[in-house]
Image (cartoon, helix red, strand yellow):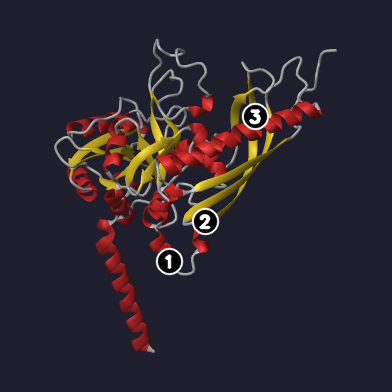
Amino acid sequence: MKARNFLIGVLVLVIIGFSISNSSAINTIDELAYVVAIGFDVGDNSDLKISFQINMPTSASSSSSSEGSSSGGSSSEEGSTSVVNTVECNSFDVGVSLLNSYLSKKVNMAHCKYLIFSEELASQGIGDYIYSLKNNVEVRPTANILISKCSAQYFLENSKPIIDEVATKYFGLETSSEKNTSYTEAINLKDFFCDLSDTFGSPYAILGSVNELESDNVGNSNPTLDDNSYVAKESEKSSQNNIENLGLAIFKEDKLVGELSGLETIVHLMLCNNFQNATVNIPSPFNDTDYISLYIYSAKSKNSVSIVNGSPYIKCDVSLKMRLLTSSEKSNYMDEENRKLIEDYTNSYFGAHINNYLYKTSKELNCDVCTFGQYAVSNFLTWGDWVEYDWLNRYQTSFFNSSVNSKLTSGYLLMETNS
């Protein structure tokens, strides 16, 4: 009994001693530099230029900015809660080591919200960087992948909170706001990596840019352009520089090959059954010069794929539920004939855009971003047969049959008001 107690006492002392001896290796909050976003550009003198946006306490913003500037990186303006540090290197891990070599704090990427690649770099291929990021234990698989139409460094330097002072919360709100518009889709590192490595579909990412300061040219854009047909950097200018996520960047394997507009993204989400809700302007069926606004709150697509003469035959039946937002003094949209006219016109409008989306992704881009391959695989008896069919290249030979059935509900409508 005494021997047992003695052994327990020795074990307790060893554990306490081990804890004390290693306490110096534990990093406190004050010793860590929290990265909230990472940008990747083509390097000027090396293969790669990496920009790290680091969250800083407000009281330390000024001193932190001077530290980043003296280290050869660019920094945010005085009073900001974050600083951008840029290094040139040949790989992501080397870039992290270089940053650690001149910062007074250890870089921590556990709170990174965005991984941003410039269009130039994405066009060359980002597969190696995606695999390196996925292999890094600090970078969370929930970090969003974004392709910037400007340089990633410029994107980060202009990504500053307007309402929220904490950059991590700001980036979180940027991602969640996409659920309210359906103009883009939040694609994270895990999603992109899975699409990059499997045989059912092609990878894609958020398309973003910096919405430039308002200029004298604002308002001179094409007045016939549908509000939903923009991509990032094409919408109306803002009163201050701010990031804008609008549309999707499409990849063939690991290379950027095209993009989808806001409306094409809405159609994409409908066909993929990932649609949340959206407000869409469509030409009025009552007056060729007017538009009507529809709030679409439900969209479901029943998809099927069969193989006919060696080519994929893809059928998509889409059901929409919507409310009419447009009203006027003389309107009577609840009249049964008018309701039917709006529903028929909506079916025709979205039917045309769905066909355009399907033929654009198949014939022009040859990228199955809707992952129809998950339906097509059931046509093959063995995995070997599926791999041999080479779906990702055969998708270009697809032909389609799509239909739309919309239902206009009566909520929030005003009846005819004049006698």
Classed neighbour count for the residue bearing mark 2: other residues with Cα under 10 Å, few (<14), some (14–19), many (≥20): few
Classed neighbour count for the residue bearing mark 3: other residues with Cα under 10 Å, few (<14), some (14–19), many (≥20): many
User: Reading the chain from its start, which is encountered first: label 1 or label 2?
Assistant: 2
Viewer-closest of 252 and 166: 252
> What is the secondary structure assignment of the residue under circle 1?
helix
The residue at 50%/38% (across/down) is 357
> What is the secondary structure assignment of the residue under circle 2?
strand
371 over 37 or under it: above or below = below
341 over 329 or under it: above or below = below
Is residue 190 at least partly visible in the picture?
Answer: no
Residue that mark 3 sits on: 294
Residue 409 place in picture, x, y as percent? 74, 35
Residue 76 place in picture, x, y as percent? 30, 28
Q: Nearer the viewer, mark 2 or mark 3?
A: 2
292 over 277 or under it: above or below = above
Residue that mark 1 sits on: 385
Viewer-closest of 309 and 225: 309
- Answer left or right for 98 relative to 107: left
User: Where, by quadrant of the figure, is residue 95 drawn?
Assistant: top left
Type of residue at label 1? Asp
